[in-house]
């Protein structure tokens, strides 16, 4: 019972935001034109329309059951006129309404599905990307597995299943009450078969007992499917992710001859998919053995129960048909749970995945915000990026760098050096405000923007133009400006290919990728440019040319670099070296005299 309450609570929390949002959406009501309306009123309106349609359909079914009775009575009485009248004047109009309503229903269902999905997807993407949550989740290990699957598939699945299950439930409840009433009135004076003992509504009690027994047994047999389906989705996504990653690192794998290791890894992951799938097959086999027998029995059980009354003349053929039909409807409504069991199992798995994704995002955000933490503050009128009492830690809590006080002055090019693993990149991350572990303060002059270029730049999927403009929009710069930047970083051969969509991250050499990133910097004109070994893949003359280019094209930009090459010193006015403290572990910055080094 507690589990049911928790599941319903989770469904409620996932469902309700769309129907309470104040976001404004647009709807195209052809031929009347486009209207702007609050998204929630649209959502609520569509749901109400679906409810009305479903209740209307139940009403139609009730009417059809009476048509059925009258048709079979006409047959029994060999009344041809009545038979044709029933078909032409009752059935045909009802069927026409039925078809029209079914078309309207499907359109409304699809419109609601895509609008709701669009809204919820945007909400998840905002939450995942906002406040660097995706990065914090990775850093902190709160990794909900495969967020891509959760956003791309699970949201849609959740919406489809919520629609079908809630509308199904509503329809079945309405069906249950309407046809239970019919069943009651049809068997109100029935006696227990073979006796004179009167049992009012006998057929209703039979239908109830039959359905409850079936539902209970189904639950017992099908319960393990919930866990199995959840695992299946996870194993499938893991396998997919391994394949995608292999494609991404195809070259390295080929160079290292890693194919057999990859095959083994893929086989292992696919092995999980198959093993779990076989468990699902086994369980579904048992469930199907039961449900199939149950449904077969359901076809004849109402006739077995009512036929004796027909044979002794207590009911007409029409009443027999209507009784059998009503029995099936009541039993069908109650066993809705049976046919929906696998759907319910999948549904719960989808709800769990979305909920645990939400939880992981919230936990990552609050853990990263919990003290001690590194405060990044903006300071008006400041002329330096200032670091005070900074203690940089690893996620596990070990301090790696301590900076009592350090100012990176505007206009002064600074080189940060130190042994590999001493924490140089981590210090940059802290200045950029994305490293949450540690304590202390970093102040950045108000209104000034920082751009950090890492050793391996991120090249997004899409056109080269988009990759150069990143993170600004593809259209943020004129074609002329982009061409000029590419030529300046000595990539003139790529100018012709700006609009080509390709796997640029795989086809461009690392040195070319680094120059694409430098072109970004030329376009973005940041106030502060942090180069974290951002030219390490270039040969020395090219590296020198790139530094000269930056100095010439970005005279207002303050450059702070990380690098190991001694040739870099020539481009910087100041050098700070990270050196281990007395304990040999915690690194601290030391000013190094540049002229003395040169
Ligand atoms: N996300 C992380 N989780 C755990 N440890 C990390 C993480 N990122 C960095 N580290 C550790 O922090 C230490 C400092 O790493 P960092 O990349 O800052 O060094 P670096 O001085 O820039 O090294 P290099 O010169 O080799 O690039 C390393 O020991 C690294 O393993």
Image (tube, helix red, strand yellow):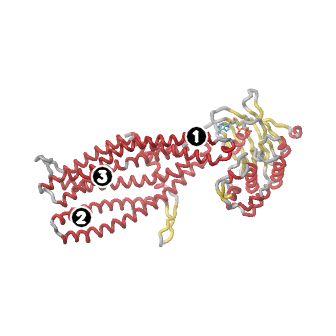
**Real-space Cα separation, disc 1 to disc 2, in angstroms:** 63 Å
Check whether the beta carbons of the residues at disc 1 and disc 3 lie within 8 A of each other.
Answer: no
Locate residue 373 relative to residue 108 in the image: left or right: right
Residue 82 image point, x, y percent: 19, 70
Q: Residue at x 74, y 57 (%)?
A: 523
Picture layout, residue 312 above or below residue 478: above
Residue 363 sits in quarter = top right
Residue 360 image point, x, y percent: 54, 42
Check whether the beta carbons of the residues at disc 2 and disc 3 lie within 8 A of each other.
Answer: no
Q: Residue at x 17, y 53 (%)?
A: 307
Picture layout, residue 92 above or below residue 358: below
Q: Earlier in the sequence, mark 2 or mark 3?
A: 2
Residue 138 image point, x, y percent: 60, 42
Q: Earlier in the sequence, mark 1 or mark 2?
A: 2
Picture layout, residue 473 above or below residue 365: below
Q: Earlier in the sequence, mark 1 or mark 3?
A: 1
Residue 530 image point, x, y percent: 75, 46
Q: Which residue is mark 1?
A: 265
Q: Which residue is mark 3?
A: 332
């Amino acid at each position: 019972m507690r589990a049911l309450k928790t599941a319903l609570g989770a469904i409620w929390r996932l469902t309700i935001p769309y129907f309470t949002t104040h976001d404004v959406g647009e709807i195209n009501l052809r031929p009347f034109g486009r209207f702007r309306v609050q998204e929630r009123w649209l959502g609520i309106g569509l749901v109400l329309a679906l409810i009305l349609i479903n209740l209307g359909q139940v009403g139609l079914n009730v009417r059809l059951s009476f048509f059925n009775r009258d048709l079979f009575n006409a047959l029994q009485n060999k009344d041809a006129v009545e038979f044709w009248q029933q078909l032409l004047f009752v059935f045909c109009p009802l069927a026409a309404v039925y078809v029209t309503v079914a078309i309207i229903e499907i359109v409304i269902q699809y419109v609601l599905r895509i609008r709701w999905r669009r809204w919820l997807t945007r909400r998840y993407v905002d939450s995942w990307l906002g406040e660097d949550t995706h990065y914090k989740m990775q850093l902190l290990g709160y990794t909900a597995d495969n967020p891509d699957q959760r956003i791309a598939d699970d949201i849609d699945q959740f919406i489809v299943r919520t629609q079908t299950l809630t509308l199904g439930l509503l329809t079945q409840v309405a069906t249950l009450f309407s046809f239970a009433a019919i069943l009651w009135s049809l068997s109100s004076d029935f006696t227990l078969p073979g006796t004179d003992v009167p049992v009012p509504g006998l057929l209703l009690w039979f239908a109830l007992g039959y359905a409850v027994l079936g539902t209970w047994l189904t639950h017992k047999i099908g319960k393990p499917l919930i866990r199995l389906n959840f695992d299946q989705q996870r194993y499938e996504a893991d396998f997919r992710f391994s394949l995608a990653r292999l494609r991404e690192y195809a070259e390295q794998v080929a160079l290292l001859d890693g194919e057999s290791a990859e095959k083994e890894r893929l086989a292992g992951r696919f092995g999980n998919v198959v093993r779990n799938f076989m468990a699902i097959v086994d369980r579904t086999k048992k469930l199907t053995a039961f449900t199939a027998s149950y449904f077969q029995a359901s076809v004849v059980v109402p006739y077995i129960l009512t036929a004796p009354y027909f044979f002794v003349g207590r009911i007409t053929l029409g009443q027999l048909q209507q009784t059998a039909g009503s029995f099936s409807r009541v039993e069908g409504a109650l066993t809705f749970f049976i046919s929906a069991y696998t759907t319910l199992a999948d549904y719960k798995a989808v709800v769990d995945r979305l909920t645990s994704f939400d939880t992981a995002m919230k936990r990552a955000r609050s853990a990263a915000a919990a003290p001690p933490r590194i405060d990044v503050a903006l300071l008006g009128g400041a002329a330096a990026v200032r670091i005070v009492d900074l203690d940089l830690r690893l996620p596990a809590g070990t301090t790696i760098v301590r900076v009592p006080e350090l100012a990176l002055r505007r206009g002064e090019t600074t080189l940060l050096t130190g042994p590999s693993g001493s924490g140089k990149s981590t210090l940059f991350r802290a200045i950029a405000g994305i490293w949450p572990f540690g304590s202390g303060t970093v102040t950045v002059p108000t209104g000034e923007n920082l751009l950090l270029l890492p050793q391996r730049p991120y090249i997004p999927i899409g056109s080269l133009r988009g990759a150069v403009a990143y993170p600004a929009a593809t259209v943020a710069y004129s074609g002329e400006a982009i061409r000029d930047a590419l030529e300046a970083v000595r990539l003139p051969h790529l100018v012709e290919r700006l609009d080509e969509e390709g796997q640029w991250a795989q086809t461009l050499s690392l040195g070319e990728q680094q120059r694409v990133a430098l072109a970004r910097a030329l376009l973005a004109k940041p106030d502060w440019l942090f180069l974290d070994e951002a030219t390490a893949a270039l040969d020395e003359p090219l590296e020198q040319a790139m530094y000269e280019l930056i100095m010439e094209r970005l005279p207002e930009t303050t450059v702070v670099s990380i690098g190991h090459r001694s040739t870099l010193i020539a481009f910087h006015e100041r050098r700070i070296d990270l050196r281990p403290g007395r304990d040999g572990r915690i690194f601290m910055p030391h000013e190094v005299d540049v002229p003395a080094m040169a």
